[in-house]
Image: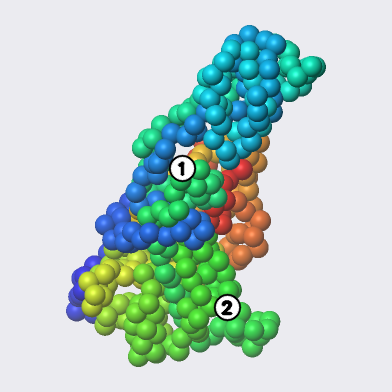
Amino acid sequence: MSTETAPTADRVVAPPPAGWEEARSRVYAVGLAAALPAVARPLADIDGSTLAEPLTTRTDLPAFPTSSVDGWAVRGTGPWRVVGRVLAGSTPAPLTEDGTTVEIATGAMVPEGATAVLRVEESTTADGLVRGTPRETPEWRQPGEEAYADEELLPVGTPVDPAVIGLAASCGHDTLRVRRAPRAALLVFGDELLTAGPPAAGRVRDALGPAVPGWLRRYGCQIRPSDVVGPVADTLPAHVAALRSALAGADLVCTTGGTMNGPVDHLHPTLEALGADYVVNTVAVRPGFPMLLARLAGHDGRIRFVAGLPGNPQSAIVALVSLVAPLLAGLQGRSMPVLPQATLAEAVPGRGDHTHLALVRLDRAAGTASPVRHVGSAMLRGLAGADGFAVIRPGTSGEPGDRVPIVPLPLLPGERAS
């Protein structure tokens, strides 16, 4: 195991923390290197997954010329003699004579030999003849107007949402090859935590056990109520047993608390006992210090990951957006998340040589970000009213009018930001 620490006669010296942007890049790279296997799934089962192969069309789109209006498919100049009707879902006989027409419905196949489609509202009928003037612009959709057969419409790594599913269906697909959703588990550390009722008698309510699974689902993970365990007893054997059990069924195990090196912080010794290697051990970001990401190779050769989230609730969410989000993007074969930018409406202080992730509310119409109140590491009130975090880089502060990156809080799979 690589502990990234150097022993001395009296103590273990921790390495300097990784820069925030460096840490994001590092965990994304190891996630991509361990990308989950591709599986074929029916369209009904792939919302929130990721394309493992390009989406292509099986035919031209449309596959045949289709009327875009209700009216008359005509041949030659009018008036036209009615010789039939064409409804959607049928194959019409060709129009072989000038001066003939068939009634046609929107979406129906245009018969071979038709020279125009006349809108029903712009036509008249009398004595079995149809009269009117077709518009100059054709009133039907040509084959390949949207796409040609075998054309690539979406690349590998595209997140699947209802729009993608609908497009795949229109292309004639019944199944697609996608990256399966990562399986996650959560271990809550801390004997001082209550799991019901109000805080009292020196014990605080666990806020992360109920909340973190929802965040993980929004990042595309599968996590069941039975995958959330804790509080785990503050002993090394209990931590080792809980983490070993969680890793048996998960690609990613998140833990809360225990990321320091105090007398009841057993995460680091647990990782050592299980033979883990650190990908990142502490990040120079505030709030959120300290956090970590480690990896282990299972008996099946597959890599599992452990994300150590701080025990303070807001710090834990900072760790999620900083380390877990880019890791999961890699595991799902997606691109590294690109951070949007916004203009600061108010000043945001820096945090010295650490990156400051400051909770903000976005005015999307104005393109601005305003800091929120109640943003201490142990507070969740500000988080509940925020849209994301403004990134204030080390050695700087944010001034009104500055353009800064924004780390958005995750949406449900399939949702798009407004």
Instruction: Give the SS element for disc 2.
Output: loop
- The relative height of residue 16 versus residue 311 in the rendered view (above or below) is above
- Report the side of 10 relative to 400 (left or right): left
| 386 displayed left or right of 351 | right
For mark 2, does the 10 Å Cα neighbourhood hold few (<14), some (14 to 19), or many (20 or more) residues?
A: many
> Can residue 118 be seen here?
no
| 2 or 1: tag closer to the N-terminus | 1
Inspect this view and state whether residue 54 appears: yes
Residue for badge 1: 171
Label at residue 59: none
Q: Of 28 and 37, which appears nearest the observer?
A: 37
Q: Is residue 332 above or below residue 405?
A: below
Disc 2 to disc 1, C-alpha distance: 48 Å
Q: Is residue 249 above or below residue 161?
A: below
- Counting from the top left corner in percent of width and height, residue 278 is at 28, 67
Residue 206 is tagged as 2
Residue under the point 45% across and 29% down: 144
Residue shown at the point (60%, 66%) measured from the top left = 379
- Residue placed farthest to the top in the image? 77
